[in-house]
């Protein structure tokens, strides 16, 4: 339930609650599930201005205090302008908003340059930076937005997500130890299929 | 500036202009005004260029005037207040522009705390939090304490922690309001009077439930509040040490729950800070186990893998915790390979990290020679010290001077790690600059005293560089706010003249003059007198013919008269009499 609510799968959470008898209303409201869903939907449909409005209504301090998210949303807005072919407006927007963010935060310059480079190509989708125009880029920004809204409520990433990260990390560490010069670790079971939770007894296999 | 009388809304293409004109117009309908303010708010949030543009067009005054409109509706109040608050997140010029109208805006926000509409209260708290979380010194806080309704209102909001409202969306807003209210109380607690006032209003009992709650944001906010109340104040620290919640002492909750390794590291850091303040003020005697945990927490957070801000905070806090205790200094020096960890602070190049690194090294080196030796082995330490001494801001110079002061107390360090003349020259440059901050002069003169000791390799170099004239100027100047500057200058001359060559003594007498020396010997400050007598003794020990015939000729009687006066002072301490007795 924690995973479904945190990641914003509202219908799945409702169904899960029905089938298990768990209560979920309080948790979802406390995490701002509806607001997060609307903001994510706005990003995924390319309406960044709407996403910003919803985000500011949810917690007006997020964009002022989280430079990285602010940049990602501005970058996505620039990408949407390029996608729709409004190159003049895109250049104007980049000069007015993104250039300043890049000046204040040099770590964003690389992503800024990649986005601007899209305008140099006739078919930006086929350029080396075409990944910026794919749905995965919108999904990435939507996930960051979701994370920021959760964090503003004092909520952490989903426990299931954390457990999976720990699982993969510990498997990698054990594998490295078992193959190292000193071979400090013997064989151990490895989860080879996460979806089916199947294990292999042979830890010498690549994970 | 927009000219409201000549600009026609229909002709302007810039929607920003239209929004601003709506604010100024008296006949605009409510809905249009609301949309304009919301539009300005959404454009300004997160965008410094937009904030700059709006400020150039006098947005602060316009928003203030919207707030002052009669019969303003609540949703418009919320948007306007949030719009004002966003400028507090901008750069320095944005904050300055907001604070120029602070004498109007802040009282309006404080008045909004008493509104019956929760969204208005929440918006006002949000903006007050944004304004006061600014690290800028000198932000006015007197309205919080002068208005008798403000503190009780803020504390009532904090007490709403559990939320009477069953509507969960409102419960989420209540959580944010509680956190902001605690933060405002924390950020506006700036003096011992504020600390005492907050304790008198019962703040400890109000924030105790937050410490024990399951919400980490509440725990962190309440720890910061506790720390601000306890800092450097024995009275308020004692009040905290004697407070209980649900049959447990507050310090027990902090030490055993919030300091534990399972908690977020920011919470551990602030729990350790609280305990260190309670311990240093003498309000609480920490057990050995808790003391080790506190030191370990600070040392662990100094390690790589943490943000620069956290590392700097941990190092500065640890420096404060151990500075008075040789045992704690010993304990800290062996914790988590601390000295090697601090060495990486200087390689990083971050200014705050360097400052905190010097402060911590200064505390570690206070007493133990073996710790000083380890510190002097830090690669490039001399260069980093020199670089910090050359910086124009005293915030960088002071920590470097403190570190130098504790290191230079060691004979071995003076003759090895600190023997480079560059360091002494940098300290001399600070002493020669009359515009320096008094605290810089005080520390620099104390360091120079050590550099002028008999066995210091820097002594001769400093003589060649003209240290005598510099010290004489400082010793004879009566404008110093900090008496330590004068005392250290005389002490430096005293060290310089101890078993020194004739030339050095002649140079001192020549620069100071007999009148200058007599002036020092008639000073009312006991320590100045003691050091002046010591200087006189050193100068007159085995005086040469040249000294007697040139510098002191005809002044022997004056000198004897003053020395006799010193002897006759009935309330003198034994030490002074010893200094006075002729050698």
Image (tube, rainbow, N blue to C red):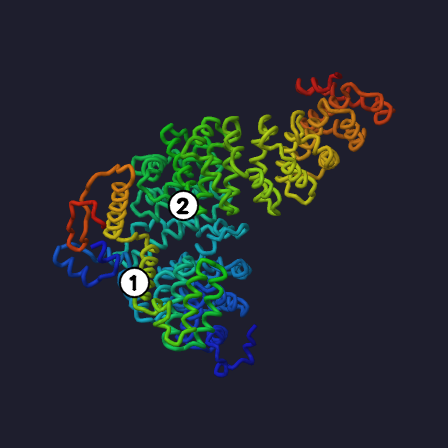
Chain of the residue displaying label 2: B
The spot of residue B51 in percent (x, y) is: 49, 65
State whether residue B551 appears in this view: yes
Horizontal side of residue A17 vs B327, given as left or right? left
Position in image of residue B117 (x %, y %):
36, 61
Image quadrant in which you'd find residue A35? bottom left
Q: State whether residue B80 is above or below residue B152.
A: below
Camera-side mark, 2 or 1: 2
Q: Is residue B102 visible?
A: no
- Displayed quadrant of residue A73: bottom left
From the viewer's perspective, tell me whether residue A43 is left or right of residue B526.
Answer: left
Alpha-carbon span between mark 2 and mark 1: 29 Å
Mark seen at residue A36: 1
Secondary structure under the numbered disc 2 in the rendered image? loop
Which chain does the numbered disc 1 sit on? A
The residue carrying mark 2 is B306
């Amino acid at each position: 339930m924690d995973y479904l609510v945190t990641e914003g799968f509202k219908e799945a959470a409702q169904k899960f609650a029905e089938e298990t008898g768990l209560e979920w209303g309080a948790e979802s409201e406390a995490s701002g599930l509806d607001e997060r869903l609307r903001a994510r939907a706005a990003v995924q449909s390319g309406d960044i201005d709407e996403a910003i409005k919803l985000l500011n209504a949810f917690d007006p301090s997020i964009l002022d205090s989280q430079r990285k998210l602010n940049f990602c949303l501005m970058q996505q807005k620039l990408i949407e302008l390029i996608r729709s072919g409004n190159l003049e407006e895109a250049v104007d927007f980049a000069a007015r908003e993104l250039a300043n963010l890049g000046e204040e935060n040099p770590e964003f310059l690389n992503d800024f340059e990649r986005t601007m480079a899209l305008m140099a190509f006739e078919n930006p989708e086929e350029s080396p930076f075409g990944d910026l125009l794919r749905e995965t880029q919108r999904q990435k920004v939507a996930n960051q937005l979701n994370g920021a809204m959760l964090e503003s409520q004092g909520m952490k990433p989903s426990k299931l997500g954390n457990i999976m990260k720990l699982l993969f990390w510990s498997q990698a560490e054990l594998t490295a130890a078992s193959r190292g010069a000193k071979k400090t670790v013997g064989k151990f079971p490895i989860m080879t299929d996460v979806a089916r939770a199947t294990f292999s007894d042979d830890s010498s296999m690549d994970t | 500036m927009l000219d409201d009388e000549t600009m026609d809304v229909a002709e302007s293409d810039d929607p920003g202009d239209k929004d601003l004109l709506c604010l100024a117009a008296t006949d605009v309908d409510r809905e249009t005004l609301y949309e304009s303010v919301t539009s300005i708010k959404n454009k300004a949030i997160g965008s410094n260029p937009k904030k700059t543009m709006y400020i150039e067009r006098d947005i602060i005054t316009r928003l203030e005037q919207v707030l002052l409109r009669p019969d303003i509706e609540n949703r418009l109040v919320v948007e306007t207040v949030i719009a004002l608050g966003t400028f507090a997140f901008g750069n320095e010029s944005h904050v300055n522009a907001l604070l120029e109208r602070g004498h109007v805006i802040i009282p309006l926000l404080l008045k909004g705390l008493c509104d019956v509409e929760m969204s208005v209260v929440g918006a006002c708290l949000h903006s007050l939090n944004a304004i006061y979380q600014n690290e800028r010194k000198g932000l006015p806080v007197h309205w919080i304490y002068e208005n008798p309704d403000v503190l009780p209102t803020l504390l009532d909001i904090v007490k709403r922690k559990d939320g009477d409202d069953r509507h969960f969306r409102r419960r989420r807003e209540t959580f944010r309001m509680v956190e902001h209210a605690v933060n405002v109380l924390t950020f506006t607690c700036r003096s011992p009077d504020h600390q005492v006032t907050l304790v008198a209003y019962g703040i400890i009992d109000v924030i105790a439930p937050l410490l024990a709650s399951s919400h980490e944001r509440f725990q962190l906010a309440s720890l910061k509040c506790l720390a601000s109340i306890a800092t450097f104040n024995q009275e308020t620290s004692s009040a905290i040490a004697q407070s209980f919640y649900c049959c447990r002492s507050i310090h027990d909750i902090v030490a055993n729950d919030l300091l534990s390794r399972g908690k977020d590291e920011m919470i551990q850091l602030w729990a350790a800070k609280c305990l260190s303040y309670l311990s240093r003020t003498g309000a609480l005697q920490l057990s050995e186990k808790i003391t080790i945990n506190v030191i370990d927490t600070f040392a662990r957070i100094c390690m790589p893998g943490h943000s620069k801000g956290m590392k700097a905070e941990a190092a500065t806090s640890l420096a404060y915790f151990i500075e008075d205790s040789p045992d704690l200094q010993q304990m800290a020096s062996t914790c988590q390979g601390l000295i090697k960890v601090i060495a990486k602070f200087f390689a990083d190049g971050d200014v705050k990290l360097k400052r905190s690194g010097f402060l911590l090294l200064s505390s570690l080196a206070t007493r133990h020679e073996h710790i000083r030796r380890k510190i002097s082995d830090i690669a490039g330490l001399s260069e980093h010290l020199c670089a910090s001494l050359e910086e124009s801001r005293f915030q960088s110079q002071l920590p470097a001077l403190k570190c130098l002061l504790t290191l230079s107390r060691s004979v071995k360090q003076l003759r090895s790690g600190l023997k480079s003349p560059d360091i002494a020259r940098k300290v001399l440059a600070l002493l020669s600059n009359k515009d320096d901050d008094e605290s810089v002069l005080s520390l620099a003169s104390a360091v120079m005293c050590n550099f002028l000791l008999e066995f210091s390799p820097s002594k001769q170099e400093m003589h060649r560089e003209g240290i005598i004239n510099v010290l004489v100027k400082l010793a004879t100047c009566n404008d110093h706010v900090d008496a330590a500057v004068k005392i250290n200058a005389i002490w430096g001359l005293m060290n310089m003249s101890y078993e020194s060559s004739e030339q050095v003594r002649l140079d001192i007498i020549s620069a100071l003059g007999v009148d200058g020396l007599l002036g020092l010997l008639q000073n009312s400050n006991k320590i100045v007198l003691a050091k002046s007598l010591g200087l006189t003794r050193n100068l007159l020990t085995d005086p040469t013919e040249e000294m007697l015939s040139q510098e002191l000729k005809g002044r022997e009687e004056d000198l004897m008269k003053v020395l006799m006066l010193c002897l006759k002072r009935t309330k003198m301490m034994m030490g002074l009499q010893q200094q006075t007795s002729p050698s």
